[in-house]
Image (cartoon, rainbow, N blue to C red):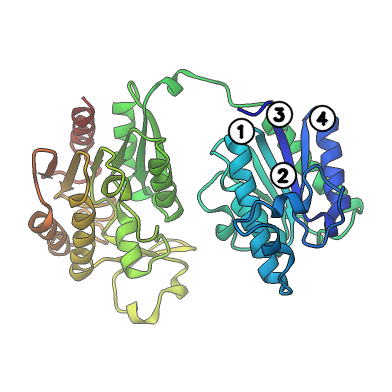
Amino acid sequence: MSAIQPAAWVVGTFDTKAAELDYLAGLLRAAGVRVVTVDIGTRSAPGVADIEARAVASHHPRGGSAVFEPTDRGEAVIAMGDALAALVRERLAAGEIQGMLGVGGSGGSSMIAPAMRLLPIGVPKLLVSTMAAGDVSAYVGVVDMTLMYPVTDIAGLNRLSRTILANAAHALAGMLQHRAPVDHAQDKPSIGLTMFGVTTPCVQAVRGLLSDGFDTQVFHANGAGGRTLEALAAAGMLRAVVDITTTEVGQHLLGGVCDAGPNRLDAAARHGLPWVGSVGALDMINWGARDTVPARHQDRTFHVHNANVTLMRSNAQELEAAARRIAEQLNRASGPVRLLLPLGGLSMIDAPGQPFHDPAADAALFDTLARLFIASDTHRLIRLPHHINDPAFSAAVAEQLRAVLA
């Protein structure tokens, strides 16, 4: 462990934003925070920051020349971002970083955000970025990064920028000086659960049944939520997964907006985490507002969830494809697996009298899973006559989770 005292890092391009970065660092120091300034400018003079640009660049696998020799600015920026990430990994391992505050435009944000994402969840990370008013998923990934839009460009101090940057500095100071209180839940093993609005009764009931012995962490199965769950599983931060809502598998195959990518169910398939789950909300593919639904789907059955969310009923062919993917992933799992099938329906709107009630389509899902899922002493397929939101189904899920962890 390094003898250097942990500090908040203030990171940016001192060749273009020195006044803003020094202002932020000064406010943090005035608030009682130890600060280390880090320069990632590709044209900076020496001596402007505690960790100079050339010291950062030296952490690139090919050395500082990878940053400073290219004549193409984009190539240099990419190389400096890689160097910063390597430096952050090194100093994190030494316990030297307790939080990070960065400022940048598109180039600076592209360098800072990947390094920020290396900080563990719970470590304060705040990026003031001119890119924060648009789609920020490329910057945030699946970590607890805070983005702040600076309103003006980051091009000198003025009345407005001083106010906004001061808010950013004081926000980071508050995060560093006022940590979440420790409670008894931190002594319990963490369980990840997946939920949609249409599977909420099931998941909430399961949470209630498990809350005495587990710290239950619920993830919205909206794409980002599934990626977050898988990332926490890969990082060893979960004891087991209660994957009630696997809708993201179908979303990925059909191009829905709640796509978690191709690695969904990796918690079981690659990492062997105990997995108890179901097929919640696979009856639907999510799109945006009604007029955003691809034209090729216009003859399908839809349910307008709200002004910005349109649900499309999955058909038998699509459910068969989802079943194949789920079976493939779960068959690879080295840990215990319990796949519970709710024969009475997959979601709140897949029940008698509801718009997505389609037993024939659901049967294609159930039958394909029954045919392809490889059962064993550790891998079990359990067919239940209940709807997914029936209390009896929730009780069965909780019972199976306790059994695999016994």
Name the secondary structure under disc 3: loop
- What is the CA distance from the residue labelled 2 to the residue labelled 3? 19 Å
With 139 as the anchor, is 258 left or right in this view? left
Q: Is residue 133 visible?
A: no
Residue with the mark numbered 3:
4
Q: Nearer the viewer, mark 1 or mark 4?
A: 1
Residue appearing at x 9%, y 54% in the figure:
370
- What is the CA distance from the residue labelled 3 to the residue labelled 1? 8 Å
Q: State the image coordinates of residue 33 (x, y, percent, origin top left).
A: 77, 30
Name the secondary structure under disc 1: loop
Which amino acid does the dot numbered 1 rest on?
A: Ala
Q: Residue furthest top?
A: 184
Mark 3 touching mark 1, by CB under 8 A?
A: yes
Residue 31: image tag: 4
Residue 101: image tag: 2
Q: State the image coordinates of residue 104 (x, y, percent, origin top left).
A: 74, 57
Residue appearing at x 74%, y 48% in the figure:
11
- What is the CA distance from the residue labelled 1 to the residue labelled 4? 25 Å
Residue with the mark numbered 1:
94
Name the secondary structure under disc 4: loop
Q: Earlier in the sequence, mark 2 or mark 3?
A: 3
Q: What crowding class fits label 2: few (fewer than 14 Cα within 10 Å), some (14-19), or many (20 or more)? A: many
Q: Earlier in the sequence, mark 4 or mark 3?
A: 3
Which amino acid does the dot numbered 3 rest on?
A: Ile
With 19 as the anchor, is 102 left or right in this view? left
Q: State the image coordinates of residue 404 (x, y, percent, origin top left).
A: 20, 31
- What is the CA distance from the residue labelled 4 to the residue labelled 3? 20 Å
Q: Earlier in the sequence, mark 1 or mark 2?
A: 1
Which amino acid does the dot numbered 4 rest on?
A: Ala
Q: Earlier in the sequence, mark 4 or mark 2?
A: 4
